[in-house]
Image (cartoon, rainbow, N blue to C red):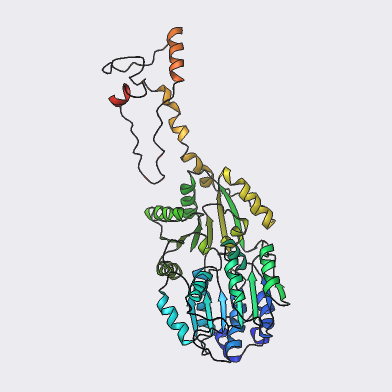
């Protein structure tokens, strides 16, 4: 089947051909005719299947006839994150270049004034995140009574981010006889309930099991320790023949620290996470797409929907807390028929998370056999380095000895009374040691003679 067989206009087919496509993906072949027939639809497809074009293309032809009015968008696309919303806007610009459609992007982190001006001119397509849309609606800057086509994209991600109440609120403000399209990688009960409530006799198109294994992605587990993670990751980055890579972390603070650590190690690394303002996030993504940096350290804000060509590797620095996130993370590679490799660094505390991932995907992920990766945990075992502590000469200050008395060498044989006294002394609590240094920082702990104030101080 070709795009020309789906009923799209000549202008749209021309734009698709110029973008380098002639054969639709499974979700596109199934969804586009139904959308053009103005049916409500549920699309279930895993990431990387081309689902964005499956609603963007028919929407362009549907909206080609009609005129926008001030503050009354004709269609609405809801996205969970700013990055996904911006990506959908790029798709409209690329495929709609031979149509005279107006578009507005309503996202947080951007000046509201320009967005309000665009709405006042009237827009055919409004792409928005739920929070910013509700903000402007409550300020009276937007009316939804003229919106006849609604797209709820990444519905399961909306659920994870707590947007379902906002979406229900938005749906009640739209015309009852609208066309509604809902796309999701999974269909948990809350999403099924949402679809039953707001979609009318929808056609369901499921092109693959959402958790099925992508055969184009080689997956590996890499065993390490919590303190050995950075060394293990650096070894993998050196050993793998990567062109571009995304490294996922569970926390924003970890993203920042790891990106700086990799930069100090000579890698061309950048970062993207939720604490960055929108302009900084877009700039960092542009650097990654342009090849200025070839490693992007990211939180899960970048895990879903972002389509960056040529990502050869994905590394999970942290095993994801939710199994679904694993599928979406590794889906950044192995896209559009290309091959990719995905590595997940695991510590003993990650056993349950990995079990849940393997149950969801139905695939037992093999352990990577690289010697460096296996040896890395031993580098950072502090107990191995500090075990000979009792072989050091006894420090002064115990047993009432003078602070000026020289240190006594360990005797070859001890008398029973002295041995008993030493054992009792060993059972006394020792002062807490300073926290082990960070992997990349110097050891600032005190290794010299015990200071006087500790010899006869609070603990004597």
User: In the displayed structure, would residue 260 be above or below residue 4?
Assistant: above
> Residue, x 48% and y 80% (percent of image)?
104
Residue 242 in view, yes or no: no
Q: Quadrant of the C terminus?
A: top left
User: In the displayed structure, would residue 69 be above or below residue 137?
Assistant: below
Q: How many marks?
A: 0
> Residue, x 39% and y 55% (percent of image)?
260
The residue closer to the viewer here, 234 or 418, is 418
The residue closer to the viewer here, 47 or 274, is 274
When asked about the image quadrant of residue 324, the answer is: bottom right
The residue closer to the viewer here, 166 or 11, is 166
Residue 412 in view, yes or no: yes
> Residue, x 58% and y 80% (percent of image)?
56
Q: Position of residue 294 (x, y in %)?
A: 45, 63
Q: Position of residue 99 (x, y in %)?
A: 53, 90
> Residue, x 68% and y 79% (percent of image)?
40
Q: Position of residue 449 (x, y in %)?
A: 30, 26
On the picture, is 81 further left or further right than 438? right
Q: Quadrant of the N terminus?
A: bottom right
User: In the displayed structure, would residue 25 be above or below residue 288?
Assistant: below
Q: Position of residue 420 (x, y in %)?
A: 46, 11
């Amino acid at each position: 089947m070709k795009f020309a067989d789906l009923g799209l206009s000549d202008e749209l087919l021309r734009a698709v051909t110029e973008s380098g496509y002639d054969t639709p993906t499974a979700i596109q072949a199934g969804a586009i005719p139904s959308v053009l027939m103005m049916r409500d639809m549920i699309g279930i497809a895993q990431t990387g299947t081309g689902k964005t074009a499956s609603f963007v293309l028919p929407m362009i032809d549907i909206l080609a006839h009609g005129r926008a009015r001030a503050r009354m968008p004709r269609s609405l696309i809801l996205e969970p994150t700013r990055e996904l919303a911006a990506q959908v806007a790029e798709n409209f610009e690329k495929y709609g270049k031979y149509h005279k459609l107006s578009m507005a992007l309503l996202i947080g982190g951007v000046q509201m004034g320009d967005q309000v001006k665009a709405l006042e001119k009237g827009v055919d397509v409004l792409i928005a995140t739920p929070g910013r849309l509700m903000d402007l609606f409550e300020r009276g800057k937007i009316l939804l009574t003229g919106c006849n086509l609604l797209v709820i994209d990444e519905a399961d991600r909306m659920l994870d981010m707590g947007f379902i109440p906002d979406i229900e609120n938005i749906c009640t403000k739209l015309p009852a006889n609208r066309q509604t399209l809902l796309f999701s990688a999974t269909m948990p009960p809350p999403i099924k309930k949402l679809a039953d409530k707001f979609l009318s006799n929808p056609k369901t198109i499921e092109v693959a099991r959402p958790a099925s294994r992508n055969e184009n992605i080689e997956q590996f587990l890499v065993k390490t320790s919590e303190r050995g993670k950075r060394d293990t990751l650096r070894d993998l980055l050196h050993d793998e023949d990567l062109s571009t890579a995304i490294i996922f972390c569970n926390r924003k603070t970890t993203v920042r620290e790891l990106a700086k650590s990799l930069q100090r190690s000579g890698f061309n690394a950048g970062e993207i996470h939720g604490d960055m303002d929108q302009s900084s996030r877009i700039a960092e993504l542009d650097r990654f797409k342009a090849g200025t940096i070839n490693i992007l350290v990211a939180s899960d804000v970048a895990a879903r929907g972002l389509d960056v060509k040529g990502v050869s590797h994905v590394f999970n620095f942290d095993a994801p807390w939710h199994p679904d996130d694993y599928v979406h993370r590794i889906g950044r590679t192995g896209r559009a028929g290309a091959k990719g490799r995905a590595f997940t660094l695991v510590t003993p505390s990650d056993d349950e998370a990995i079990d849940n991932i393997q149950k969801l995907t139905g695939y037992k992920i093999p352990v990577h056999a690289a010697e460096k990766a296996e040896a890395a945990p031993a580098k950072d075992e502090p107990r191995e380095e500090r075990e000979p502590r009792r072989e050091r000469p006894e420090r002064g200050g115990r047993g009432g000895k003078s602070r000026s008395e020289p240190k006594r060498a360990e005797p070859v044989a001890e008398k029973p009374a002295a041995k008993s006294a030493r054992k009792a002394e060993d059972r006394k609590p020792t002062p807490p040691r300073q926290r082990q240094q960070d992997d990349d920082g110097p050891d600032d702990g005190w290794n010299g003679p015990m200071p006087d104030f500790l010899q006869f101080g609070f603990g004597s």
